[in-house]
Amino acid sequence: MSETVLEVKNLSKYFPIRGGVLRRVVGYVKAVDQVSFSVKKGETFGLVGESGCGKSTTGRTILRLLEPTDGQVLFEGRDIAHLSRRALRRVRRDLQMVFQDPFASLNPTMTVGELIEEPMKVHGLYTKRERKEKVREMMETVGLDPAYVQRYPHEFSGGQRQRIGIARALSLRPKLIVADEPVSALDVSIQSQILNLMEDLQDQFGLTYIFIAHDLSVVKHISDRVGVMYLGRMVEVAPKRELYDHPAHPYTQALLSAVPVPNPRHKRERIVLSGNVPSPANPPAGCAFHPRCPKAFDRCRAERPEMIHLGGEHYVACHLFDEGAQAG
Ligand code: SF4
């Protein structure tokens, strides 16, 4: 599991803010701001952060569902951030997305069979008969009874609808799936079934996942490595166990302190952050987290921290880990 399949380099996505009678661009919402990380073949890379931190926009920009403002997205060594639409179409088969709300992402006028068949049809794959066969196979693979092939999305439960969403994504036999909060709309009892299914499919098809979630316990369950985002920036990346046992960034520490620990004797001290997340239209200078950081010092207000290597696969963007920082 060491081959890098995806490398995201300084990826940015800014949305223009328009104002005045002429609707001129008066500023930008920096939803994703110079984000870098890599994903290895066969691993699950968890992307976490509070709502509005840019994690979903990052996922969509990687897949070019949103056009990047700047940066590179190297998939198997090829920069897909700058591919023409035509060239991108060929790569699309390898990169698929599973959405948070399967009900909203499934056309209610199509049957399950049509929904799962559609991506294969769009890409001109197989004969009609083969596609029908693949649909049945795919339904079985994700735990849906093929006898329901003529039913419509509203006739299924939330968990079953997410299985349809997964079958759609899988029908093209992709290499990488970006799963955007795939279980957060589901009951807790159903969440683990879908997570287990995703893990089984990963083994079966050799899939690589980027798993986006705000819930750190869900990310912990499924991820190999985790990236933490705050206000459009990546602030810490580490293997799961390292991140949960030794969080370095003050924001990660605060996030983790709010996660319930199964053993009540190992209670974590809760770190309550003051203030709200600032607007990405007007992010604070220096470290974007400084207005809320209990450990902020002068340098944090003036200088944006770069990613620092802490050893192994652990990286953090915080001046506390830069030699001589406190003196600065
Ligand atoms: Fe806190 Fe400064 Fe580190 Fe930012 S750089 S997280 S403000 S200590």
Image: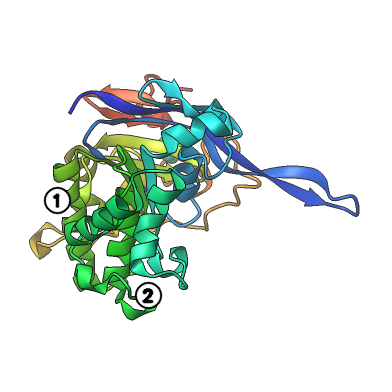
Q: How is the image coloured?
A: rainbow
Identify which amino acid the numbered label 2 is placed on: Tyr
Examine the rendered structure and indicate whether residue 261 appears above or below residue 244: below
Q: Residue at x 38, y 23 (%)?
A: 322
Label 1 amino acid?
A: Asp
Q: Looking at the picture, how far across and down is residue 317, in whole percent?
A: 41, 31
Tell me if residue 152 comes above or below residue 327 in the rendering.
below
* x then y, percent, for residue 160: 27, 70
Identify the image quadrant of residue 197: bottom left
In percent of width and height, residue 313 lies at: 24, 27
Report if the CB atoms under discs 1 and 2 are less than 8 Å apart.
Answer: no
Q: What element does badge 1 sit on?
A: helix
Seen as rendered, the residue at the extreme bottom is 155
Tell me, for residue 152, which label it has, or none. Answer: 2
Q: Quadrant of residue 250?
A: top left
- To which quarter of the image does residue 154 belong? bottom left
Direction from residue 56 to residue 172 in the image, left or right: left
Label placed on residue 200: 1
Foreground residue among 19 and 241: 19
The one of 244 and 40 positioned closer to us in this rendering: 40
Number of numbered tags placed on the structure image? 2
Within 10 Å of disc 2 (Cα), the crowding (few <14, some 14-19, many 20+) is some
Q: Where's residue 89, x and y in %?
A: 49, 36
Is residue 269 shown to the viewer in this render? no
Report the side of 192 relative to 123 (left or right): left
